[in-house]
Image (cartoon, grey):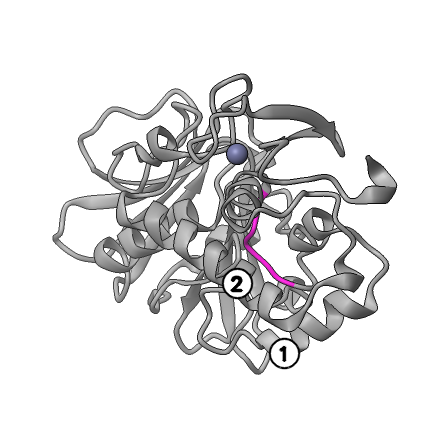
Amino acid sequence: MPELPEVEVVRRGLERWVAHRSVIDAEVLHPRAVRRHLAGPEDFVQRLRGRHIGTPRRRGKYLWLPLEESGESVLAHLGMSGQLLVQPHEAPDEKHLRVRIRFADELGTELRFVDQRTFGGLSLHPNTPDGLPDVIAHIARDPLDPLFDEDAFHRALRRKRTTIKRALLDQSLISGVGNIYADEALWRARIHYDRPTAGLTRPRTAELLTHIRDVMNAALAVGGTSFDSLYVNVNGESGYFDRSLDAYGREGLPCRRCGTPIRRRPWMNRSSYFCPRCQRPPRAAS
Ligand SMILES: [Zn+2]
């Protein structure tokens, strides 16, 4: 599943290749890919025709294309395997091509939504006054957003009876931190995933946020992580950050700080990877 850095890489690709182009036509090849557009595939296509794409935007893992002068946006759900590809018209259709968007210019490329498992999709939504598609108005700012409020985040952590990794994955508190980056940032900060948030000090919260931003920026610098050959960026190139992960996916391998084998524990239908020596479990849970 793509996380914030992967989605940002796709956003940048879209900004480079599809921003400020006018849609001449769209084609829905599989209705499931537009199921979140409740008015149906024909309405989706009709409302796209003739629209100008603005600068693609992102909050957390949510990505959308604002349609200029319409007050609407195309929200892209990448799901487990969704890809947005900019391809030359003559490129053969991908096996799992779901939606094609053509433009009224001579650049020779089109936008394709390809999704093997079809958990993702595209849908049109009215914007809030902040320019967010209304269905994601409740999503908190992400830690790379210059307007992210660290004090408010810290106060929310202190107030909540929760544990740190649950809080990091709570999209109403902080968006865009998924399982992989949570494990990486917690390893860097030497915090066990089950630690209660109520006891975190303000400097500790600040330190953790710094690690989250560092690990995301490092991933961004190399084009996002790639755990799945299905994930490719807008130009079809895989990220390769997975080679430099410190905790995630390294069960049994030595911790790069202390040499203790990294452990994996089942966690909320997923896994948590941690160093049992650097990241001591909280007393109540040990
Ligand atoms: Zn260690």
What element does badge 2 sit on? helix
Whether label 2 lies within 8 Å of ligand 1 gets the answer no
Q: Provide residue 220's location: percent of width, then percent of height.
A: 33, 50
Question: Of 19 and 37, which appears nearest the observer?
Answer: 19
Considering every residue shown, the one lying at the far bottom of the view is: 129
Q: Provide residue 256's location: percent of width, then percent of height.
A: 42, 32
Magenta stretch in the rendered image = 174-178
Screen quadrant of the C terminus: top right
* Left or right for 279, reference 64: right
The residue that appears at 41% across and 51% down in the rendered structure is: 216
Dot placed on the residue nearer the N-terminal end, 2 or 1: 1
Rounded to the nearest angstrom, the CA distance separating label 2 from label 1 is 13 Å
Considering every residue shown, the one lying at the far top of the view is: 252
Q: Amino acid at mark 2?
A: Glu
Q: Is residue 133 visible?
A: no
Above or below residue 186? Residue 127 is below
Residue carrying label 2: 207
What element does badge 1 sit on? helix
Magenta segment: does it hold 176?
Answer: yes
Above or below residue 239? Residue 203 is below
Q: Which mark is residue 75?
A: none
Q: Which mark is residue 151?
A: 1
Q: Provide residue 160's location: percent of width, then percent of height.
A: 82, 64
The residue that appears at 40% across and 55% down in the rendered structure is: 214
Which is in the foreground here, disc 2 or disc 1? 2
Q: Provide residue 143's location: percent of width, then percent of height.
A: 51, 64
Q: Main secondary structure of the magenta part?
A: loop
Q: Amino acid at mark 1?
A: Asp
Q: Is residue 138 visible?
A: yes
The residue that appears at 30% across and 56% down in the rendered structure is: 12
